[in-house]
Image (cartoon, helix red, strand yellow):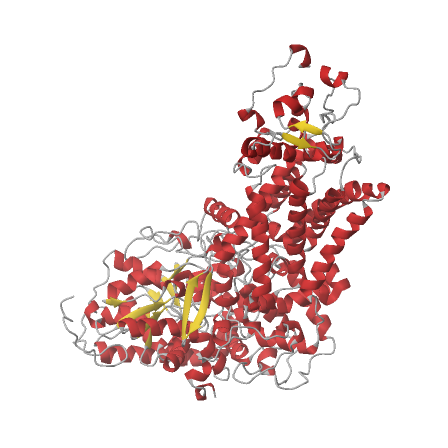
Amino acid sequence: MYDANKIIPGLVIFVGLMTFPIWAGMGKAEPVPKPKIDTPVIKEMAEKHCVESKNYMADYHMQMLITWRDKALRDGKRIYVSSSGQKYNVSLQNTCMKCHSNKKEFCDKCHNYVGVKPYCWDCHIEPIEPKGNVL
Amino acid sequence: MGVMLSLIAVLVIVLVPLAGSQVSGLQYVFGVFFPYAGFAVLLAGFVFKVLNWAKSPVPFRIPTTAGQEFSLPWIKQAKLDNPSTTTGVIGRMAFEILAFRSLFRNTKAELRSGNLIYGPAKWLWLGALAFHWAFFIIAVRHLRLFVQPIPGWVEFLDKIDSIMQIGTPPVYITDVLLIGGVTFLLLRRLLIPRVRYISLPADYFPLFLILAIGTTGILMRFFIRTDIVAVKSLLVGLATFHPFIPKNVGAIFFIHATLVSVLMAYFPFSKLMHLGGIFLSPTRNLANNNRMVRHVNPWSYPVKVHTYDEYEDEFRDLMKGAGIPVERE
Amino acid sequence: MAKDLTQKEMLRIDYNPPKSGWMDTPVKIKPGIYCHPAKPEKITDVGMPNAHTWNPLDEDWNLPANWQQIFFEGMRERLDKHRSFKIFMDICVRCGACADKCHFFLGSGDPKNMPVVRAELLRSIYRKEFTTAGKILGSLAGGRELTPAVLKELWYYFFQCTECRRCSLFCPYGIDTAEITIIGREILNLLGLNINWIQEPVSNCYHIGNHLGLKPHTFKENIEFLRDDIESYVGVRIEPTFNRKGAEVLFVTPSGDVFAEPGIYTLMGYLMLFEHIGLDYTWSTYASESGNFGFFTSFEMAKRLNAKIYAEAKRLGVKFIIGGECGHMWRVIHQYMDTFNGPADFLEVPVSPMTGTTFENARSSKMIHITEFTADLIKHGKLKIDPSRNNHMKVTFHDSCNTSRAMGILEEPRYVINNVCKHFYEMPDTTIREQTFCCGSGSGLNASENMEIRLRGGLPRANAVKYVHEKHGVDTVACICAIDRAVLPASMEYWVPGVKVAGVSELVANALIMEGEGERTLNLRGEEIPVTEGGDNV
């Protein structure tokens, strides 16, 4: 009464489930996405910079955007003063998307990679991108 | 004392990567070496432990029966609480493992003016269930950071878990349940005198550890954010055996990773093995068909018995005198 | 001496544990709680080791010099033999759900009577000796040195557990303290540390055939006395047979029912029932014990004593076996006998000769419970019953631990009682069926010297009886267990005076209309049956 016929398969299943990421990723790991910043507007910028530092934006842009939403829509405040003292219009469409007009190559790249589905576009109209930018 | 020691141990596990990850070379230790080591110890340790249990046989069929047995055809059997078939056992085990059936029975006894009163006591069941399910779903949800492309069901789980759309990024229901559950389990250990009396350092340590894991995870998601793309690239690197430390990964991640690594390594050597143990528990996983199907004891050996012949030899005269039939006159 | 304690004094129970931790509080062995040690000759005459004279109150227990080695080797062996033991040593999370489920804890408030702590007493040794963490970290990893004081503590508390399994019902992992106690006692027995209340019955049962040591002629005479009582109370003469070859059925029951009140009335019940239906059965003087105190000693001893039942069934050439009302007996019969001493391929699948019912649930072991048998008879209308003779009684039913939690015979006795009694009242739900409370004296702890702990352990059961006694006027606790019949009267007398204890078969027989019976003015106890209102038109 050792039940090896149940315990061994049970352990195989356990190890199989636990190592799911290993065999799921076997050989088909996609490269780390690099969001593209080669839009015409950015290309024309003399000094390429976002409203805040690149690292800060990578980590905190979602919280900044929500603050912007609340500022603009609930408080009617449309001016954001960055940490460097520069003033920006608080607007997703007119500020963010002006430079980052390539949503598919910029926003979606990372969002898809980490499985994030922001609800920005529930209200905002998705930018229409020229076909050439898709690939 | 057990409380303080456990707390200090967990604080050390937080402080070491906090300081160590500032040194660039050491990030590899916290981000690659510890997770690999922890995961390997978890897998090997778990398998070893279960095989070690399996090496000891189940000599007797000893289910704890919790309802009416299979009996006469007109008597209704409690098929789940006292199963007599494999299907019934699977049902019983499913209830036990997925819904904590036995804990659901819990009562609370009180002595009131000389009378024992038994009230229902479902909080432990609720807290434990919330905690365990939350922990499980959180672990599964983390697959989004280990696997690329992300399986649809993981994304679905994530969506459901964050369906409340509170905060940015959205708060997970399971995060709240985990922290709530583990806090409840910790508080009852600290505040209920009887539970405190039976608690060992080994009871506080995993609670503090899991609390720290949950806290660092939540901090990382909401307050001390770090580049999640970099984190995922690191974790995918681990899963595909191309480990590397990307730039822009904050100390908070290394703390979280170290805590999880310690939990994994600790798991097989601790009471946390109740995860495996419940499947093998002979009072739960056996059918109550004892008189229907003979259970074989593999180490059964012949024993010395007092045979009838010996008995008759000793008592023959008395038996004959009393008119009891004998084999030999 | 326990009887000197008033109820009020007994009920001064504090469920809050003391400040000092259990590991740091040495055991204090108190008279009234423990049973006398086994007499050495009773140990040696069944070939068990390390028999010696000792006194629990003494500093020195005269242990063999290498007692620790014996203990550890015994533990190692049992870890390798019992998966249950190994797992139960490893996976307890100390959630405390079991704590207030134990009748001994509820009755005494002694924190070491919480099932979790009882198990931890041994687990701490396990961690220290058998786990790497415990070897290195010691008490930090919950490990504890096995000192003479710790051994005494183990002994004290493993003989304060009646192996009732109530805690295992509530444990989320099914950790069964009974299993730990059984194995703990096995290890203690390697050191000659049994109690005499268990050891002497074991010796008697082995050599003479039953716990009480009734030799063949005495056994027969006792039953014949009861037969004579039936004749005078009922007016029917019954001729039971003994060791008769060729009978269809072998009947075995605990010897307590042959000897002492109120068990003897249950035995009279069996005699009348079998006579009533004309069952072709025999008693055996060789297998004159179906209870098994060996089970409270070691698995091996349980097997050695149990072997007689199948051996005798084979020798006599019966078709199947019926077992009487008993608790731990049925744990052994139901969960162990077939494994111990089967397969019983020389017997036939039990079929009731009266109703033709095949007892599917005993297909392999070929042994059925008297209550299953009786319930089937009643269902098929094979018994002529006048339940009004029990009208003067208000009955409740006490489920025995083992038949409930190691078998699940719950409805059968209720069906039988409801057919032979008019007034039946259940105790509260949390105290019956699978949640039933122990009588307080099971697993060989029904001695007289440990009366205090027996009464304390009996409190939860007695308290539930008191509830129905006060609410409905219940005056009779029915049961299907010989130990219950032996011990509940004392517990009732102390906690709920005015409540008597009766086996279900006694109630059945009181209601049976026997062929050729005289006027039934007396019950099986020889007492006048009170005429109750509307008594004769039920």
- Please name whichever residue, C314 or B294, is drawn nearer the observer in this view of the structure: B294
* Residue B251 locus on image (x, y percent): 76, 43
Determine the residue positioned at 58% across, 39% down.
B167
Q: Is the residue B317 above or below the residue A14 in the image?
A: below
A9 relative position to C236: left or right: right
Question: Is residue A105 something that shows in the picture?
Answer: no
* Residue A40 locus on image (x, y percent): 72, 14
Image quadrant in which the C terminus of chain C is located:
bottom left
Determine the residue positioned at 50% across, 73% down.
C104
- Please name whichever residue, B238 or B188, is drawn nearer the observer in this view of the structure: B188
Q: Within the image, what quadrant is residue C397 found in?
A: bottom left
Q: Is the residue B272 above or below the residue C293 in the image?
A: above
- Please name whichever residue, C108 or C75, is drawn nearer the observer in this view of the structure: C108
Q: Is the residue B95 above or below the residue C227 in the image?
A: above
Determine the residue positioned at 23% across, 79% down.
C233
Q: Within the image, what quadrant is residue B59 found in?
A: bottom right
C19 relative position to B26: left or right: left
Determine the residue positioned at 70% across, 60% down.
B6
Question: Is residue B13 something that shows in the picture?
Answer: yes
* Residue B243 locus on image (x, y percent): 79, 35
Q: Is the residue C113 above or below the residue C232 in the image?
A: above
- Counting the numbered discs, the total is 0
* Residue C66 locus on image (x, y percent): 74, 75
